[in-house]
Image (tube, rainbow, N blue to C red):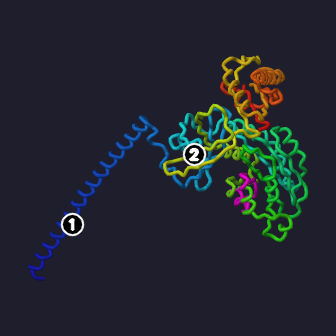
């Protein structure tokens, strides 16, 4: 091999090694620069986060969840609470696209109008025991043989269920529809849980040889019951069977309804369906979703189902303002808007309707029935309303906390209700427009384990019996 070729090879290898070293050095510098940039970026992010945290502490209202609240949310005005008039509480739902409750709404996200006039909110919270929201529940129960254990579970757990409702401000009534292949029994509403349990106890589970039962006709029957106009209405369907439907040859002889048509009827009557059913029967989900309700798996422990149901019902917001009207009007239109891009929702309510409750904070000395002077203005305003509405009749309900003997508390609550009645009569209200009853400590709206709870339980409620 010529010597010139060896020199050429050595020069080539040297240049190649030099090129490799140059590239490696550049890469190292570039990587170092990237790492330095990443370090700078991390520092900026940390400083920004620290600044945000400081700003939140200064003014947390600047950082609400309003950016998540848009036109995809479903706002439903459920009711209006006038029990603490002139304070008005609007009760509403905020649901996402899957009908789940949205829990991060703040007072800064909500705008409220009364009869077209903007109002200034003074309170905002989830539903509490200071509210009075009327809800009529109709339990539609399948009485066939396989339902025996579920029927017993309703009776065993109903006390716990209504206690949870009461502690969240739900003014409940309970009705009952019993069915198999036909609707076999109907019981109109009561607020007496012992009476309701006796109705359930009388259901004899039997039969059920065929697969389908007539749940759709049971739901139709709920639309014919004597619900309060002011109340939210919930049908609680409990069955482990599929349903007869007009879409099937057999069902055509028993009902004229399908899942879609019965849901439309219920929705038209503002009845939400909460179905405790087999998860394998698809139609019940359709009915529940179309009416704004939910479905629950009947195979789960019944106590857990009713607890979840109670939580669903009471997962509501209330926004409260003070109205300028001294006397309760016949009706009121309210508007709620949630979020900057939210669509306003308007609903009109009849206020002075049969079954509405007013809670007036009338004070009595401990263990006595003499009305204290601090309550005179409240009595005066109630008398003014009754004079302006001469056809209204009221039931005056007296309540106590659980201090002392239960029998004595009954007598004390009656005496206090009579004192209120006498005061109204002295102010010119006809005696035949006022009736009284005392419940003692039997109907608490709060726990009796705290002084604040006891104070809420010592109350006088007024129920409109005739408009």
Q: Residue at x 80, y 62 (%)?
A: 243
Q: Residue at x 66, y 23 (%)?
A: 377
Residue 160 visible in rendering: no
Q: Establish if 291 lies above or below 322.
A: below
Q: Position of residue 390 (x, y in %)?
A: 76, 33
Q: Which residues are magenta?
A: 268-288
Residue 336: which numbered mark, if any?
A: 2
Q: Secondary structure at mark 1?
A: helix
Q: Position of residue 407 (x, y in %)?
A: 84, 23
Q: Which residue is mark 1?
A: 20
Residue 437: which quarter of the image?
Answer: top right
Residue 270 part of the magenta-drawn span: yes
| Label 1 crowd (10 A; few <14 / some 14-19 / many >=20) | few
Q: Position of residue 282 (x, y in %)?
A: 72, 62
| Label 2 crowd (10 A; few <14 / some 14-19 / many >=20) | many
User: Closer to the camera, 296 or 443?
Assistant: 443
Q: Secondary structure at mark 2?
A: strand
On-image quarter of the C terminus: top right
Mark sitting earlier along the chain (1/2): 1
Q: Residue at x 79, y 37 (%)?
A: 466
Q: CA distance from mark 1 to mark 2?
A: 71 Å
Residue 265 visible in rendering: yes
User: Closer to the camera, 153 or 92?
Assistant: 92
Residue 126 part of the magenta-drawn span: no
User: Closer to the camera, 314 or 392?
Assistant: 392
Q: Establish if 121 lies above or below 417.
A: below
- Give left or right: position of 33 versus 261: left
Of tags 1 and 2, which is closer to the observer?
2
- In this view, the residue farthest toward the left is 4
């Amino acid at each position: 091999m010529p010597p010139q070729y060896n020199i050429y090879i050595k020069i080539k290898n040297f240049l190649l090694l030099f090129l490799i070293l140059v590239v490696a050095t550049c890469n190292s510098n570039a990587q170092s620069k990237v790492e330095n940039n990443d370090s700078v970026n991390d520092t900026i992010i940390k400083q920004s986060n620290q600044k945000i945290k400081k700003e939140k502490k200064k003014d947390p209202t600047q950082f609400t969840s309003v950016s998540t609240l848009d036109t995809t949310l479903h706002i439903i005005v459920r009711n209006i609470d006038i029990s603490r008039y002139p304070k008005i509480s609007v009760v509403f739902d905020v649901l996402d696209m899957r009908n789940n409750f949205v829990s991060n709404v703040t007072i800064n996200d909500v705008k409220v109008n009364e009869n077209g006039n903007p109002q200034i909110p003074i309170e905002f919270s989830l539903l509490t025991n200071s509210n009075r929201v009327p809800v009529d529940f109709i339990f539609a129960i399948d009485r066939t043989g396989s339902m025996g254990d579920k029927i017993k579970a309703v009776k065993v757990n109903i006390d716990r269920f209504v206690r949870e409702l009461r502690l969240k401000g739900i003014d409940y009534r309970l009705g009952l529809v019993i069915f198999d292949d036909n609707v076999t029994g109907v019981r109109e509403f009561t607020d007496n849980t012992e009476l309701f349990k006796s109705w359930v106890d009388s259901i004899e589970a039997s039969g059920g040889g065929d697969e389908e039962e007539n749940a759709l006709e049971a739901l139709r029957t709920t639309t014919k019951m004597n619900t309060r106009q002011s109340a939210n209405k919930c049908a609680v369907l409990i069955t482990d069977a599929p349903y007869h439907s007009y879409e099937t040859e057999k069902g055509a002889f028993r009902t004229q309804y399908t899942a879609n048509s019965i849901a439309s009827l219920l929705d038209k009557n503002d009845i939400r369906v909460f179905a405790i059913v087999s998860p394998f029967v698809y139609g019940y989900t359709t009915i529940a979703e179309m009416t704004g309700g939910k479905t629950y798996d009947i195979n789960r422990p019944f106590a857990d189902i009713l607890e979840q149901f109670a939580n669903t019902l009471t997962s509501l917001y209330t926004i409260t303002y003070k109205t300028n009207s001294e006397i309760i009007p016949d009706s009121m239109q309210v508007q709620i808007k949630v979020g900057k891009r939210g669509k306003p929702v308007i609903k009109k309510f009849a206020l002075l309707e049969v079954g509405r409750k007013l809670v007036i904070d009338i004070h009595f000395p401990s263990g006595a029935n003499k009305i204290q002077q601090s309550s005179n203005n409240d009595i005066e305003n109630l008398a003014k309303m009754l004079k302006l509405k001469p056809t209204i009749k009221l039931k005056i309900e007296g309540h106590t906390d659980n201090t002392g003997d239960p029998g004595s508390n009954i007598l004390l609550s009656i005496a206090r209700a009579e004192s209120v009645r006498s005061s109204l009569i002295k102010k010119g209200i006809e005696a035949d427009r006022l009736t009284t009853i005392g419940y003692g400590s039997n109907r608490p709206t709060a726990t009796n384990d705290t002084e604040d709870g006891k104070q809420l339980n010592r109350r006088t409620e007024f129920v409109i019996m005739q408009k």
